[in-house]
Amino acid sequence: MNEITQNLLKLVSDWKGSFSGAYNIRENGCGIDRKSSKNIKIESKQDKPGLDIRIAPGTKGETVYIPACVTHGGVDDLVYNDFYVGAGADVLIIAGCGVHTENGEPARHNGIHRFFLEEGSRVKYQEKHIGTGGIGIKSIDPVTDIHLGKDSVLEMDTVQIGGVDKTLRETTAVAEEGARLIIRERLLTDGEQTADTIFKVELNGKNSGADIVSRSVARGASRQTYTSDIVGNAPCTGHSECDAIIADTAFVDAAPKLSARDPDAELIHEAAIGKIAGEQILKLRTLGLTEEEAEAKIIEGFLS
Amino acid sequence: MLCLEDISWIAPDGRTVLNGLNLEIPDGKLTVITGPNGSGKTTLARIIAGIENPTSGRILLDGKDITGMDVTERARYGVSFAFQQPVRFKGITVRSLLETAAGGKQEDRKLCSILGDVGLCSKDYLDREVNATLSGGEIKRVEIATVLARNSRLAVFDEPEAGIDLWSFKSLIGVFKRMHESLNGTLVIISHQERILRIADEIVLLADGAIKAQGESKKMMTQVLSSGSVKAACCREEALFNE
Ligand SMILES: Nc1ncnc2c1ncn2[C@@H]1O[C@H](COP(=O)(O)OP(=O)(O)OP(=O)(O)O)[C@@H](O)[C@H]1O
Ligand SMILES: [Mg+2]
């Protein structure tokens, strides 16, 4: 494993020279290290690049790490990872991605992750994206497709706070009876970067629910779009929130959509886009911070 | 000593809000500023904190002209201000805000005692975000706590009692009394509450953007109570404070 990979691993997953639990490390399109555990089996797909990750029913408190790193320009990595989570399991999945370029050539990682949660299972899914190095367009285009079985819960924490030039983030989910989807997205773009986020959630089962909160900061001349569509096909609750801070000449477009297809579907959307409130900066300045320190503190809190 | 010399402030819409105001606020004393709604109390406090710049006039703290200092410089020079309408922050915790106020990392014990002073149970509040989920009374108490945490040369509290329940109000009065006892600076409270006026050494009555009267608390009390801008203590409050 090269030094850049080690550094990226530290940034995107809690790599401390090794992982404890099941893991697979992908570097420039190749698996370079892998370990399954008694309850979590990781195997290569036969028909295309990627992995099948099978988590045994009832597995509790275990962690799976599936980080992917691209360490130089000229790489366009495409990978399909499928996670099968057995009934009653309760696990943490950490799937960060880091892209590094320095020779001016573009590099891209496109990870297509599918989740199949069986009855009563719970997954906490953490995804951290970062770009490092110098010139060369760095792209990360994650596709996340989630199938929530009866009474299952998936909590997705997705963070991208620097260095990625282009990102298209597509998340789709289908929830059966009693299932819940919780998504927390944090995005920061600067310079000429672009970020496009699309969520589409179908709440098909009785008492299913989704709660999507996206917070983002767009600075410089960066561009962000946010699109969400929550479809309530049953008695269900859906909430989405897009909260963006803009600075400089950045653009943010938010297009939230709610589709109620059942009289007992309760769907809510909130969206707010604007620059940092002047009173917030003033309050922190009365505590002794400079204007720049106040802005940094507000943004750090907002994206925490 | 804080000296305001001939301070005027004209609002962006052209209205004269403060009109040639002169005021001396002595050290080691608790000064309460009162006056009807719209008389210019908050504007005066914002001018002291540097949030607004006076259209004319000078502000002197211990003889030093601080008129040209911006908000940050004044804060660092020892000016603190608790907002009448506290500001909310998504994602910033009470702990983080108090630490910013105190100027660095603090022991939990210290933060707990500050929160205790404003009647908040620290265990429940330190890791709460200072966001819209805090009630009006809770955020107001956090706001006061940020000024207590600074322990500065000059502290101005703008209507600290507003929206606070009687029990917390009682403990707040206790805090101001204690601050008063250990005071080595200047304490200014803007208030409409008789209960707060009663712990004052000096009372300033503001009307139409100028000082209408100023003097020792006892002498001012009758005039101020009859001016109609002060809310007299109610009987429930009396009972609670006398227990
Ligand atoms: N930015 C502004 N633009 C226009 N008018 C303003 C502005 N700021 C304050 N004012 C006006 O100045 C007057 C004084 O306001 P200020 O907030 O200082 O009153 P106050 O004495 O604190 O009142 P209260 O007891 O209600 O808190 C009010 O009439 C208010 O409408
Ligand atoms: Mg006021």
Image (spheres, helix red, strand yellow):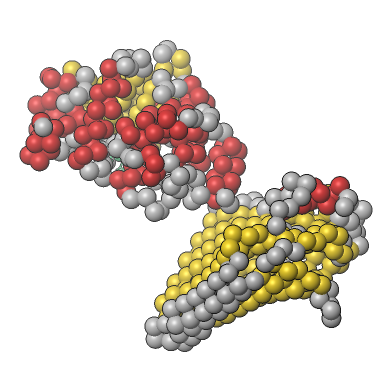
Q: Nearer the viewer, residue A232 or A29?
A: A29
Q: Nearer the viewer, residue A90 or A50?
A: A90
* Residue B88 seen: yes
Q: Nearer the viewer, residue B127 or A294?
A: B127
Q: Residue at x 19, y 24 (%)?
A: B199
Percent position (x, y) of residue B23? 30, 21
Which image quarter: residue A131? bottom right
Percent position (x, y) of residue A66? 74, 62
Q: Residue at x 39, y 54 (%)?
A: B133
Vertical comparison of A151 with A284: above or below: below
Q: Residue at x 10, y 41 (%)?
A: B236
Percent position (x, y) of residue B32? 25, 26
With B228 as the anchor, is A214 left or right in this view? Answer: right
With A212 as the anchor, is A4 left or right in this view? Answer: right
Q: Residue furthest front?
A: A38
* Ligand 2 found in image quarter: top left
Q: Residue at x 60, y 42 (%)?
A: A296
Vertical comparison of A130 with B243: above or below: below
Percent position (x, y) of residue A284? 49, 37
* Residue A287 seen: no
Which image quarter: residue A61? bottom right
Vertical comparison of B180 with A251: above or below: above
Q: Nearer the viewer, residue A16 or B238?
A: A16
